[in-house]
Amino acid sequence: MNRPSWAPPEVDIEKPSIARVYDYWVGGTHNFPADVAVAKSIADKNPLLPRTLRSNRAFLRRAVSELTTLGIDQFLDVGSGIPTEGNVHEIAFENNPDSRVLYVDIDPVAVAHGKAILAGNTQAASLLGDLRKPGDIFAAQETRDLIDFSRPVALILAAVLHFVSDADDPKAMLREFTDKLAPGSYVVISHAGMEKKPAPEEVPASASQTYQENVSEVYWRDINEVTALFEGLELIEPGVVPVPLWRIGPEGDPEGFGAEAHALAGVAKKV
């Protein structure tokens, strides 16, 4: 197999990567046959999972587009995965060519691909970083080069806080980020969950051994618990809702979830 330019030599393209599996599910092209095989195997056992992730990606595109209309031109996307088709920089640049975007992920494979994809781009970068260590993210050279925290920033935490247990205090973790943000900044969150916390038998079952070996445990939260993550911030309309219903666009709800989506989303402003 020919190795494309976005796959650096240190990345094993014969070994499935959960970041590339995700890329395949959301319609990206930065994946290989090994990833596609795993993606299809998981989807056969849990068809809700890729549909939910596509619905989440559509929400993220709407949120970024909305924030650019509100004048936001800096985006810090923590837990970004591979910055591929329809991701933050494409939407932001389309609406404001002067935007700046920093992707942060804990997965070295995702970051390696991100660096290759964004090579030569002076307005977007990919950084290896841990959500649980905001100070390290703020101190990184890539962050200091791209993000001016004296001005409003959009902090994106899409489909990542549900990997943080209550014991690890996601609200306190989030405050470490928001304390750094200037007034007028926004926080974008999507999170596994439903209006009411489902009973264990209602939560989609683990789909495959391969997937479970590559991701952390998911902590489902209901709409009140996700709303509480925005404490101290001003939620914009429509508040915290199922992902397809957040300012639903002209494309409607192609996955057909409506209020039954297994993910919630909201956007809030720091005033």
Image (cartoon, rainbow, N blue to C red):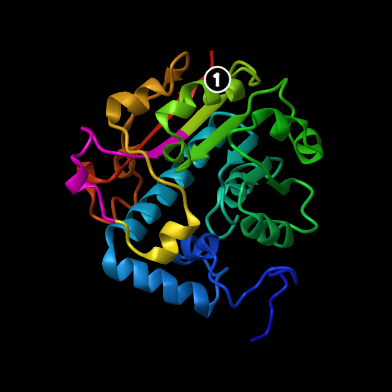
Q: Residue at x 53, y 33 (%)?
A: 67
Q: Is residue 138 above or below residue 102?
A: above
**Image spot of residue 128 (x, y percent):** 69, 47
Q: Which residue corresponds to mark 1?
A: 175
The span shown in magenta is 189-205
Looking at the rendered image, the quarter that the N terminus falls into is: bottom right
Q: Is residue 239 visible?
A: no
Q: Is residue 2 left or right of residue 146?
A: left
Q: Is residue 169 visible?
A: yes
Q: Nearer the viewer, residue 70 or 59?
A: 59
Q: Amino acid at mark 1?
A: Arg
Q: Nearer the viewer, residue 94 or 62?
A: 62
Q: Is residue 155 left or right of residue 22?
A: right
Q: Is residue 97 left or right of residue 48?
A: right
Residue 194 lies in the magenta stretch: yes
Q: Residue at x 61, y 53 (%)?
A: 107
Q: Nearer the viewer, residue 202 or 124?
A: 202
Residue 193 lies in the magenta stretch: yes
How many labels sit on residues? 1
Q: Residues within 10 Å of mark 1 (few under 14, many from 20)?
A: some
**Image spot of residue 91 (x, y percent):** 56, 48
Q: In the structure shown, which secondary structural element does the residue marked by tag 1 occupy?
A: helix
**Image spot of residue 252 (x, y percent):** 30, 50
Q: Residue at x 75, y 45 (%)?
A: 123
Classify residue 39 by image quadrant. Answer: bottom left
